[in-house]
Amino acid sequence: MHEQQQQQTQYEPKIVAFLCKWCSSAGSDLAGVSRIQYPANATPITVMCSGSVSPQYILSAFNKGADGVLVSGCHIGDCHYMEGNYYARRKLYMVSELLQFIGVEPERFRMSWVSAAEGTKYAKVVRDFVEDLRHLGPQDKLKAQRP
Ligand code: FES
């Protein structure tokens, strides 16, 4: 097999997933306990609310080698802190714009709204994201070059 083809078939995208404790983190747990099959490419980080995710966290994840970053919270209108996900949506929209501005595919950043009862949806979000990242290939622009 050609070396480049071999690298593509072996490429497993790394995803950092910031999940709100009240909804999406519980949704990912439900996917697990329901034994729903989905790729194990996402490393979950539980946060209190999607609104608590700073753009800096996202850039830092890319800098540390993430190929994609997911922020997932309660459905709009269901935030445990009333308006946190509204702030998240506005604030993190700017991240997509920034990524595009600096030449990183904005598709590497994704937001989703997954409730505690939506294990199937969480699995689908991760599955779709992994598929899309496979097409984009590894993220090297923001990844720190370490000796
Ligand atoms: Fe879930 Fe705010 S508590 S998005």
Image (spheres, grey):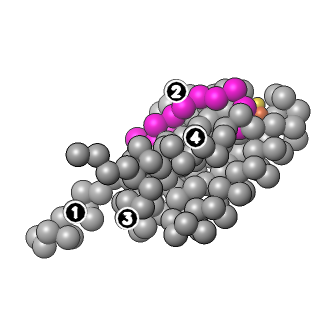
Residue 142 location in percent, x, y?
44, 56
Callout 1 secondary element:
helix
> Which quadrant of the structure image shows residue 107?
bottom right
Q: Residue at x 71, y 57 (%)?
A: 94
Callout 1 environment at 10 Å: few (<14), some (14 to 19), or many (20+)?
few
| N-term-proximal mark, 2 vs 1 | 1
Residue 20 percent across, percent down from the top left:
67, 32
Residue on which the image places disc 1: 7
Cα separation between marks 3 and 1: 10 Å
What residue did someone put label 3 on?
A: 137
Q: Position of residue 86 (x, y in %)?
A: 83, 45
Find residue 57 and name its label. Answer: 4
Q: Quadrant of residue 99?
A: bottom right
Distance of label 3 from label 2 (alpha carbons)? 31 Å
Using a 10 Å C-alpha cutoff, classify the residue at mark 4 as few (fewer than 14 neighbours), some (14 to 19) or many (20 or more).
some
Three-letter amino acid code of the residue under disc 1: Gln
Alpha carbons under labels 4 and 2: distance apart: 28 Å
Reading the image, the residue beneath label 2 is: 33
